[in-house]
Image: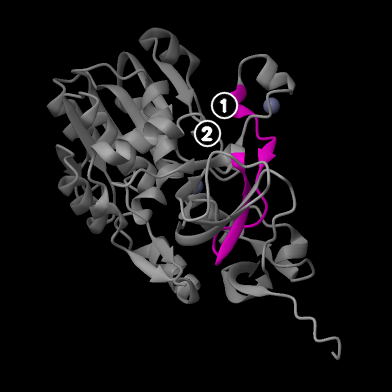
Amino acid sequence: MSTGHTTRTMRAARLYGKLDVRVDQAPWPAIEKPDDVLIHISHTGICGSELHAIEGYELSKGALGGALAPSNLGHEYAGVVIEVGPEVKAVQPGQRVTVVPRGPCGKCALCRAGISALCRKVTHRGGSWAEAIVAPEQLVYALPEDVPNAVGAITEPLSCAVRIIDRAGLKTGQNVCVIGAGPIGLFSAVLAKHAGAAQVIVSDIRASRRDLAKRMGVDVVVDPTTQDLREVVMHLTHGRGVEVSMEAVGLEPALSQAIELVATGGTVMWAGLAPTHISVPLSPNDMFLREYTLRTSWGGVLEYERTIRLEQAIDWTPVVQEQFPLDQAMHAVQFARTQAAGKVLLTIDD
Ligand SMILES: [Zn+2]
Ligand SMILES: [Zn+2]
């Protein structure tokens, strides 16, 4: 090219096909709207939903066949504001921030009906497994001084756990069981303990996750490959089951087991993201006789402010120790799938 004009690019880890994440050059994101905020990313998390996409659960044939452009990855992150549009007031360059992936529009039927937590209309452009990203001011939250970027980067999954605890209606002194100690299960278990649960029992097949759960204050950890979770729960609850039974796997038999373990009158929380083809047999008669409540919980977009306060109140640093540079994204993905204890983060240096 002889024009001398160069288009700025950045490193980004993107999905090219099943289990095929590549780090290459992507267009540098630009401020386009007056309320845009340009953020240099410092830490970004690997979410279970991304693992699903990478494993091919939700990929279109085109993406799998390589016919479509690579897709962006990443929605959990923290970083530093580098530029703002002319109408932005809440943050300035230099401010450390985290971003909610989507927010309510205030105009659609859901928002008008007061169900704005489920409105997905305001979103940002691009993925966060990259050097920089642009987000509308409405979605940007400043991080307090005492919340490091690595912890700020877990705000999104932690906000999901905050909403899970809210929707479970947990009361002090209740017993809680969490099946699956991936980030969402672990965060929910820790929050349950802080919210006054009497006993929190966590089950996970991965030893590293059980160890971390113990370290984060969980009362009882169970290895379902060598222990019978039902026996442990019934023993600890005098045969009643737990008042709040959470599932954070998204697969059978965990979904059904959460129902088996709930006490009469208790609440089952299905918090795991299940692949689209999963369905679960339910006994209406059992549901009737035990009058349990079955609930789900989607996201935590309205819970960010309270979540950031919990990042100040609780020491989350043990759960953000597994960090890899962006260039090792595929390695980090494999680590998250098979070995990780806590939240796996990608780090981006300047
Ligand atoms: Zn997420
Ligand atoms: Zn809306």
SS type, badge 2: loop
Q: Nearer the viewer, residue 114 or 70?
A: 114
Q: Is mark 2 within 8 Å of ligand 2?
A: no
Q: How many marks?
A: 2
Crowd around label 1: few <14 · some 14–19 · many ≥20 (10 Å): some
**Residue wearing tag 2:** 301
Q: Position of residue 325 (x, y in %)?
A: 42, 73
**Residue wearing tag 1:** 117
Q: Is residue 131 magenta?
A: yes
SS type, badge 1: helix
Residue 43 lies in quadrant: bottom left
Instruction: Specify the farthest residue to the bottom.
Output: 2
Q: Residue at x 39, y 49 (%)?
A: 152
Find out whether the residues at labels 2 and 1 contact each other: C-beta distance under 8 Å: yes
Where is 201 relative to 31, above or below?
A: above
Where is 176 relative to 342, above or below?
A: above
Relative side of 144 to 54, left or right: left
**What's under tag 2, amino acid-wise?**
Val
Q: Which residues are magenta?
A: 116-137
